[in-house]
Image: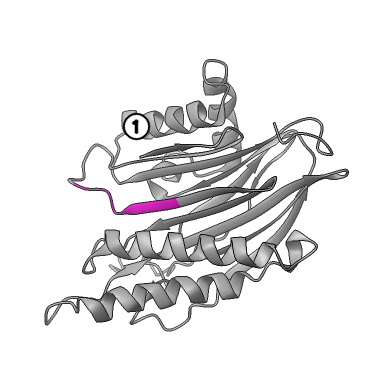
Amino acid sequence: MVVDLGWVAAVTHKGSRRAGNEDAFSVTDANGTAVIAVCDGVGSTDSPAAAARAAATAASDALSDDLRAVAVVADVDLTKAAAAAQHQVIAITQADPPRAGDLPPSATLVVAVARADSDGVSGVVGWLGDSRAYWVGAEALRLTADHVYDGPPGDEQSGSITRWLGLDAADVTPSSVDFRAQAPGLLIVCTDGLWRYLDEPQALAATVARLRTDNPQPVQLAQALVDYANSSGGHDNITVAIAEFGPNPGGDAT
């Protein structure tokens, strides 16, 4: 699936080793403000793809609605967006209950809202789980910190997510961060299908710089990053969403 809104775009692919795609995304240009939601369905649960789709749509809609009521991006209510996503995941669970012994539909969530102004780019990011957001510009920054269990060597649960959306979720309050950066730059939101191969922000930035020569538009770059992940092994579903902020932040986004 590909969505191209010009300065905001996203691509998702099932990867090289999976039969289906359990990722989902929503990208919106809300009057010059980028609204991005990316979800990764938890593969060990029932109907993970449906959970991811429901969550991404609900979170994006909640953020877009909230933007109409606030003056600055920092006032967007990320907790409300996560609650809306959780409500929809529970709704699909109740409409089609999992079989006995199956875990209820679950998904990770990362949402980002960002806009350009006269001082650069301002944004907020919220997340549950291990999908990520990065800023790639004059500096490369990882904006999120994974919710994962860091167990001792040999612990089979080490690396498993500790927060998610779903009927069995204990805590759906997202972690959040405000950020401000100088344009030009790229806000990149992705699932682990990409970042497993480009963990550190400097590695992502170097790959972006190399790929961007032949892929100047956000949708082209997103596709090139998906292709990179597939060529590196494609172990999982891959989703990449990009919002580009140009050198004149007080003017056009691109």
Residue at screen point 48% across, 77% down: 172
Query: Is residue 24 on the magenta stretch?
Result: yes
Q: Quadrant of the C terminus?
A: top right
Q: What residue occupies the far right of the structure in this picture?
A: 118
Q: State how the image is colored.
A: one colour
Q: With respect to residue 26, does 129 lie above or below?
A: below
Question: Left or right: where does residue 147 sit relative to residue 16?
Answer: right
Instruction: Give the residue drawn at x 42%, y 58%.
Output: 39
User: Badge 1: few (under 14), some or many (20 or more) residues near its Cα, within 10 Å?
Assistant: few
Give residue 103's position: percent from left, percent from top: 22, 76
Q: Quadrant of the N terminus?
A: top left
Residue 131, x across and y down, in percent: 46, 56
Q: Quadrant of residue 77?
A: bottom right
Q: Give coordinates of residue 166: x percent, y percent.
A: 36, 76
Query: Secondary structure beneath disc 1?
Result: loop
- Span highlighted in magenta in the image: 20-25
Count all numbered tags in the image, as a single digit.
1
Which amino acid type is marked by label 1? Ser
Residue 88, x across and y down, in percent: 39, 73
Q: Quadrant of residue 228?
A: top left
| Front position in the image: 196 or 239 | 239
Choose top left, top right, bottom left or bottom right for residue 22: bottom left
Viewer-proximal residue among 211 and 95: 95
Q: Please determine whether, in this image, residue 115 is positioned above or below residue 214.
A: below
- When the figure is inspected, residue 252 is found, relative to residue 53, above or below; the finding is above
Q: Residue at x 56, y 22 (%)?
A: 212
Q: Which residue is mark 1?
A: 232
Comparing 62 with 194, the one in front is 62
Whether residue 159 is visible, yes or no, is: no
